[in-house]
Image (spheres, rainbow, N blue to C red):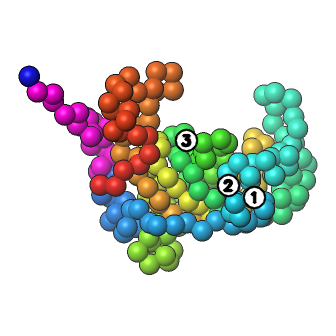
């Protein structure tokens, strides 16, 4: 009796959809696994580049304080955004929530494993970055097209300015989006994780190159 090797990827509708998304991303941005994504240093973290956690820790105090379920007043929002003064950041993380699309805008949360930061993407002004040239893809809605191809767990880099939304949440108004890596395997269930230890060893959460 011989052992049957565990397949690296369990082919199903989700993994096939992710592979299809990966091919479409390659057609849009070229290399789907760039070597690096330089980040800003507006929070002076020990490692020298901004992380989602360092940005959240430094700028979350700008969020207006309101009672649970209430929205900040226009005056509170104006004061909060004046305090942020359009701070420019470049940060990266994993797509932690499905995009919430509301007409021509979308909200997504990125995570660095410790903290989450909301990004705000407008259909008309967000642009994708070519990983082959490093230049912005100057095509209408290139960023929006990239957004539609993202899956839970993908790695994404964004550049934009900080502001507080009408609900009072610290966010990045995205001008540029750079795809960094595809998660070809759906993220494990938070409660149960990966039940097969062999798959857990051979099929880690991190993205794989196809």
Pointer 2 and pointer 1: residues touching (CB < 8 Å)? yes
Q: Against 157, is 134 above or below?
A: below
Q: Which residue is mark 3?
A: 96
Residue 95's spot in the image, x, y percent? 53, 46
Quadrant for the N terminus in the image: top left
Q: Is residue 172 magenta?
A: no
Residue range in magenta is 2-20
Crowd around label 1: few <14 · some 14–19 · many ≥20 (10 Å):
few
Q: Which mark is residue 45?
A: 1
Left or right, 103 with respect to 88, comes to left
Residue wearing tag 2: 51
Q: Nearer the viewer, residue 116 or 86?
A: 116
**First in sequence: mark 1 or mark 3?**
1
Q: Is disc 1 placed on a helix, strand or loop?
A: loop
Q: Nearer the viewer, mark 2 or mark 3?
A: 2
Residue at (44% x, 31% y) in the render: 188
Q: Nearer the viewer, residue 99 or 23?
A: 23
Describe the element under mark 2 as helix, strand or loop: loop
Mark 3 neighbour class, 10 Å CA radius: few under 14, some 14 to 19, many 20 or more: many
Look at the image and tell me in which quarter the C terminus lies: bottom left
Q: So how many labels did they put on this image? A: 3
Label 1 – label 3 distance at C-alpha: 23 Å
Q: Write the residue at 91% across / 49% down.
A: 75
Q: Is residue 31 rendered to the left or right of residue 56?
A: left
> Residue 184: x percent and y percent?
35, 45
SS for tag 3?
loop
């Amino acid at each position: 009796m011989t052992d049957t090797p565990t397949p690296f990827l369990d082919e199903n509708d989700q993994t096939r959809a992710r592979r299809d998304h990966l091919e479409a991303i390659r057609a849009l941005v070229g290399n789907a696994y760039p070597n690096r994504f330089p980040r800003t240093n507006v929070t002076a973290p020990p490692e020298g580049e901004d992380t989602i956690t360092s940005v959240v820790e430094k700028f979350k105090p700008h969020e207006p304080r309101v009672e649970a379920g209430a929205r900040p007043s226009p005056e509170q929002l104006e004061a909060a955004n004046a305090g942020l003064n359009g701070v420019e950041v470049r940060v990266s993380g994993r797509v932690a929530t499905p995009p919430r699309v509301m007409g021509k805008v979308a909200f997504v949360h990125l995570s660095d494993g410790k903290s989450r930061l909301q990004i705000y993407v407008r259909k008309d002004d967000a642009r994708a970055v070519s990983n082959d040239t490093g230049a912005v893809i100057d095509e209408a809605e290139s960023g929006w097209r990239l957004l539609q191809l993202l899956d839970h767990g993908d790695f994404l880099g964004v550049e934009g300015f900080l502001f507080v939304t009408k609900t009072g949440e610290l966010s990045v108004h995205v001008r540029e989006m750079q795809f960094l890596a595809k998660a070809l395997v759906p993220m494990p269930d938070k409660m149960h994780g990966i039940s097969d230890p062999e798959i857990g060893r051979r099929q880690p959460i991190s993205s794989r190159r196809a």
